Amino acid sequence: MGIARTVSTTRRIVGIPVMEVAPAGRDPRGPVLWIPPLGGDKERYTDQLNGLAQRGFLAVGIDPRRHGERADLPPDRLFELVMNRFRATMWPILGGTVLDAMAVIDEELSAHRIDGPVLAGGVSMGGDIAIALAGIDPRVTRVAAIASTPDWTRPGMTLIGRPGQVIDQGEATSGGRWLRDHLDPLAHPDRFRRELAIRLDVGAADTHVPAEAAHRFAALLADGPPAPQIAVVDHPGLDHPDLCRDPQVLGGALSWLTGPS
């Protein structure tokens, strides 16, 4: 058999730039949102979106707030700003993009006349967004997150490449604090007590997004009922950049997310 053909489209959904990759000539099985890390854009995982579409899914990449077509700073400048004013800068990006992702799901299900299931995932910041999305949108039934956390406060977070330097996260803005209070998964664990499966790939040597919160989240939700299925996959020796870039970790997470062909 040859490789299944796909059709790629870039458009805006209520002002949100998205990249859609769909199987050619047939109805998609359901949408899969794959969200990039800090500094990434909707095209970051084009190859993976194509692979998802070849498996029959409607694959959707999103430009997070302040990223891609929505950028107000170059990626390196945005990264520097986030590291210097983490809560004031990152929390509005996280929370705003979670709400954007819900709006994208609304439109994709309506436009393609499909019911789902809805799958979501991402790397680092993108995975943070996907986890939080599952907490407020029950249409999301499966989440795969790499080098991500359910705790937006990231206790003990250090600079990338400097494991001994803990980041001063600063103060949140009023709007950012509201978003964190309402959307942070560890602040609302009961929202995840439903039919839901989550895979969290974490690095044992990752001090930028410490794995502790993923294990804490899984232990907290194990005390159901109902209890979601949460698997924390530890990767010994991998720090944050290595985990984010590892093709085997990415491939394994995507295979788990979509299940058998």
Image (spheres, rainbow, N blue to C red):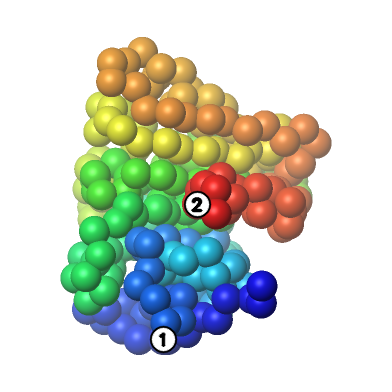
The three-letter code of the residue at mark 1 reads Thr
* Residue 27 coordinates in the image, percent (x, y): 35, 72
Secondary element at image label 1: strand
The three-letter code of the residue at mark 2 reads Thr
> In front here: 45 or 181?
45
Q: Quadrant of residue 114?
A: bottom left
Q: Residue at x 51, y 80 (%)?
A: 6
- Crowd class of label 2 (few under 14; some 14 to 19; many from 20; radius 10 Å): some
Residue bearing mark 2: 258
> In front here: 31 or 91?
31
Q: CA distance from mark 1 to mark 2?
A: 23 Å
Q: Are marks 1 and 2 in contact (CB under 8 Å)?
A: no
Q: Is residue 79 visible?
A: yes
Q: Quadrant of the C terminus?
A: bottom right
From the viewer's perspective, tell me whether residue 143 is left or right of residue 215.
Answer: left
Residue bearing mark 1: 10
Nearer the viewer's eye, disc 1 or disc 2? Answer: 2
Q: Residue at x 28, y 27 (%)?
A: 193
